[in-house]
Image: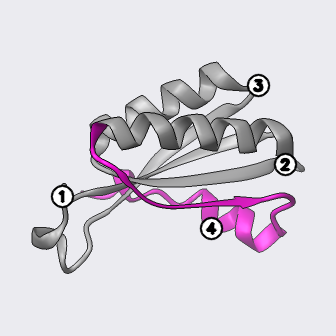
C-alpha cells in the first residue's frame, strides 16, 4: 500500500468507535477494519475486550490521527498501547489483513 500504519489498541468497542471517529476527523486518514482480542486476563481489565483501531495515511497524518484517537479513547475507557509503522513490510501488510471479527 505504501502508506503509514497507525495502531491504537483500546479497551472496548465504544472506545474504538470514539477513537476512530476522532482520528478520522483530525487527519487525512482512512480507517481499516477494527480487530479484537480477548486476552486470558480479560476479567481483570477495565473492559474485557481489546480493540485495535487501524489508521492509514501519511506518517504525519497517522501520527495526528493516533494522538486524537488516544485522547478520545481515554475519555471512554482507556488505551492499552499505540504504535506507528512508517513503511510496513510486505509480510506485515499480510498480517494487517487478518481480522478476528471475521471469526465466530
In the picture, measured across the screen, residue 43 lies left or right of residue 25, that is left
- The image quarter containing residue 44 is bottom left
Q: Earlier in the sequence, mark 2 or mark 3?
A: 2
Looking at the image, residue 92 lies above or below residue 30: below
Cα distance between the residues tagged 2 and 4: 13 Å
Q: Which residue is mark 4?
A: 95
Q: Which residue is mark 2?
A: 1
Q: Are marks 2 and 1 in contact (CB under 8 Å)?
A: no
Q: Which residue is mark 3?
A: 28
Q: Position of residue 10 (x, y in %)?
A: 39, 52
Mark 2 element type: loop
Q: Earlier in the sequence, mark 2 or mark 4?
A: 2
Q: From the viewer's perspective, is the residue at label 1 or at label 4 nearer? A: 1
Q: Position of residue 94 (x, y in %)?
A: 69, 65
Q: From the viewer's perspective, is the residue at label 2 or at label 3 nearer? A: 3
Q: Position of residue 63 (x, y in %)?
A: 73, 44
Cα distance between the residues tagged 1 and 4: 27 Å
Mark 4 element type: helix
Magenta segment: 76-104
Q: Position of residue 83 (x, y in %)?
A: 64, 62
Q: Which residue is mark 1?
A: 46
Q: Residue at x 18, y 58 (%)?
A: 46
Q: From the viewer's perspective, is the residue at label 2 or at label 1 nearer? A: 1
Q: Which residue appears farthest toward the left when viewing the image?
A: 43
- Image quarter hosting the C terminus: bottom left
Q: Earlier in the sequence, mark 2 or mark 1?
A: 2
Amino acid at each position: 500500500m505504501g502508506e503509514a500504519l497507525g495502531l491504537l489498541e483500546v479497551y472496548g468497542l465504544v472506545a474504538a468507535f470514539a477513537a476512530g471517529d476522532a482520528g478520522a476527523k483530525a487527519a487525512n486518514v482512512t480507517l481499516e477494519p477494527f480487530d479484537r482480542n480477548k486476552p486470558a486476563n480479560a476479567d481483570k481489565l477495565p473492559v474485557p475486550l481489546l480493540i485495535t483501531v487501524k489508521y492509514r495515511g501519511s506518517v504525519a497524518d497517522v501520527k495526528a490521527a493516533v494522538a486524537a484517537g488516544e485522547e478520545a479513547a481515554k475519555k471512554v475507557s482507556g488505551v492499552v498501547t499505540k504504535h506507528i509503522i512508517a513503511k510496513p513490510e510486505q509480510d506485515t501488510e499480510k498480517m494487517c489483513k487478518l481480522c478476528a471479527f471475521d471469526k465466530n
